[in-house]
Amino acid sequence: MADRYVFPAVLTYEEGYEIAVTFPDLPGCATSGEDDAEALAMGKEALGLHLWGMELDGDDIPSPSKIKDIELEDGEVIAMVEVYMPSVRLAQENKSVNRTVTLPAWLNARALEQGVNFSQVLQDALKKGMGITTG
């Protein structure tokens, strides 16, 4: 299992529709987005989940096609999509890890007094700080 994959995606632009994202080397791996940024973000997520499923099933992951070998139709462009699989795998397993943090004693005492869930507060702050809206 590789840690990083890069596959060509075909983005299809059709008036009145979201931008379709397909992966010629991975039948069934498809998504869409309202604009380029969303389409590429959704493509990255779809690619990661598709490859993760293939890994779980023990399927052989094909080598990516060369850009020059992909035939395009009108309204289509190619973008390379990269996915870092350790992040995908951990997100799907949702495995927790322990981290040690240091707090001022007064802040710790106040938080304990108010029944603060330290793990949840830290998770929420990390997600907010990194712009993560899911999970």
Image: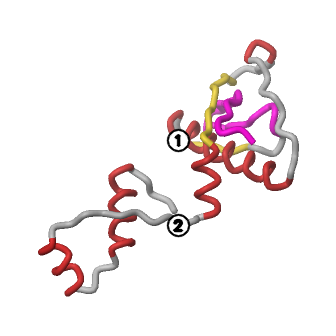
Rendered position, 52 above or below 8: below
Whether the residues at callouts 1 and 2 have beta carbons within 8 Å, the answer is no
Image coordinates for residue 123, horizontal then vertical, percent: 39, 64
Q: Mark 2 or mark 1, which is nearer the start of the sequence?
A: 1
Rendered position, 77 above or below 31: above
- Residue type marked 2: Ser
Q: Is residue 76 left or right of residue 25?
A: left
- Where residue 120 sits, quadrant-wise, is bottom left
Mark 2: which secondary structure?
loop
Residue segment shown in magenta: 1-26
User: Within 10 Å of the Cα at label 2, are there few (<14), some (14-19), or many (20+) other Cα atoms?
Assistant: few
Q: Residue furthest left?
A: 106
Q: CA distance from mark 1 to mark 2?
A: 29 Å
| Viewer-closest of 67 and 48 | 48
| Residue position marked by numbered label 1 in the rendering | 38
Image coordinates for residue 31, horizontal then vertical, percent: 68, 45
- The residue sitting at 65% across, 36% down in the picture is 4
Give me the disc on residue 83: none
Rendered position, 18 above or below 98: above
Image coordinates for residue 73, horizontal then vertical, percent: 77, 21
- Where residue 30 sits, quadrant-wise, is top right
Q: Is residue 6 magenta?
A: yes
- The residue sitting at 64% across, 53% down in the picture is 89
Image coordinates for residue 21, horizontal then vertical, percent: 68, 37
Quadrant of the drawing holding the N terminus: top right
| Residue position marked by numbered label 2 in the rendering | 96
